[in-house]
Image (cartoon, grey):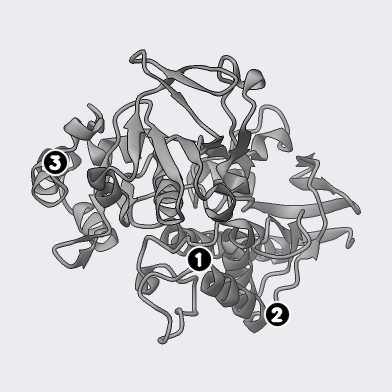
Amino acid sequence: MRDSTTVAIIGAGPAGLAAAACLRQAGLDFVMLEKAQQAAPAWRRHYDRVHLHTTKRYSSLPFVPFPRDYPRYVPRHLVVEYLEAYAKRFDLAPRLGETVRAITRDGRGWRVEATSGALHASHVVIASGYNAEPLLSKFAGIDTFKGKTLHSADYRNAKPFAGQSVLVVGMGNTGAEIALDLAEGGARPTISVRGGVHIVPRELFGVPIQMVGMATRMGPQRINDALFPLILYLVVGRLEKFGLRRPKQGLLQQIALASRIPVIDVGTIGKIREGAIKVAPDIAEISQGGVRFTDGRHDYFDAIVFATGYRPGYAKFLEPGIEPGPSGVNARASDLGLYLVGFHNAVTGLLREIGIEAQAVANDIRQRQNRKKAAETLPV
């Protein structure tokens, strides 16, 4: 590994590739480290049926739109194809198999300890992924369950579960779509929903919900949060009788405060209405053959899929006491020379935000480097 570089990029997923392309266009030197053996590892691991929930027009990375012949909502295998072509176009060659163990202060720059050794960088861009590490909640009795258990990160398709009764724990976008996949694949899924959930259609009156979300940024959050339920009741209907209720927090308020985007429905609600997908409340206890829910009901299941979310995971290799600012460019990130890209989960689309952040970060680093060179050339 080279001893020093201007920028160390941690991660070679969409955020890392976008940051690298923007730095390349800005004429800046960088080294990109990826712990997996291929770039874009998360997209390669996603379950088979996953598609972008946002339109290709507003989901491409900087400088390169999705091909015209791609569908509006791009499927997983074409996202991977796009990312591979993107890396090739900008001659991006991440150092693969490089697990970052520590990032610490080193003078005015940073020391990055990785598998192949240490790297000094003037700036660091952490792009290791919003969903880097699966979260698996510890439920009472889980160790006694005799059926199959897995996190949604390990789910591929419904084939192994055909004819089985499967509990999906959690109704975010992943849980909702896995339940739909199971129902369409011949399984009998139930979704356990802990609290309220905001559900929106992928398109509202023919307009992609992503574009609706972009438009709401122009108005006051409080007013939009008051109007959204009224509009969505007309489109989605009242779902309380199926066991689904809306949170007390408004849709936009929940995104702003908890980074929880709504469930973008691609067919799950229809299957719930048909009875092909059942809804249950939170889990009280898991037993050898089944689950007791908080409403007292008990059901037997052959398998449990935990769609219980992820965490970024960068805190484990970042020097204690170092707190990066929010994702993108801000005063703290700029002063530290330590940036996050890809950690702002918005209804307007994570990939869209990644593109905006990557360009802003590259511009900020270029400006700081230019100021540094100018200062070094001043007469003493």
Q: CA distance from mark 1 to mark 2?
A: 18 Å
Earlier in the chain: of badge 2 and badge 3, it is 2
Describe residue 84's horizontal placement relative to residue 228 as left or right: right
* Element carrying mark 2: loop
Q: Is residue 180 above or below residue 210?
A: above
- The circle drawn on residue 109 is none
Q: Are marks 1 and 3 in contact (CB under 8 Å)?
A: no
Q: CA distance from mark 1 to mark 3?
A: 35 Å
Q: Given this view, does label 1 or label 3 mark the residue nearer the observer?
A: 3
Q: Quadrant of residue 214?
A: bottom left
The local crowd at label 3, few if under 14, some if 14 to 19, many if 20 or more residues have their Cα within 10 Å, is many
Q: Quadrant of residue 101?
A: top right
The quarter in which the C terminus is drawn is bottom right
The local crowd at label 2, few if under 14, some if 14 to 19, many if 20 or more residues have their Cα within 10 Å, is few
Q: Is residue 379 above or below residue 191?
A: below
Which residue corresponds to the image point at 27% horizontal and 59% vertical from the top-left? Answer: 202
Task: Report the residue marked by disc 1.
Answer: 359
Task: Report the residue marked by disc 3.
Answer: 229
* Element carrying mark 1: helix
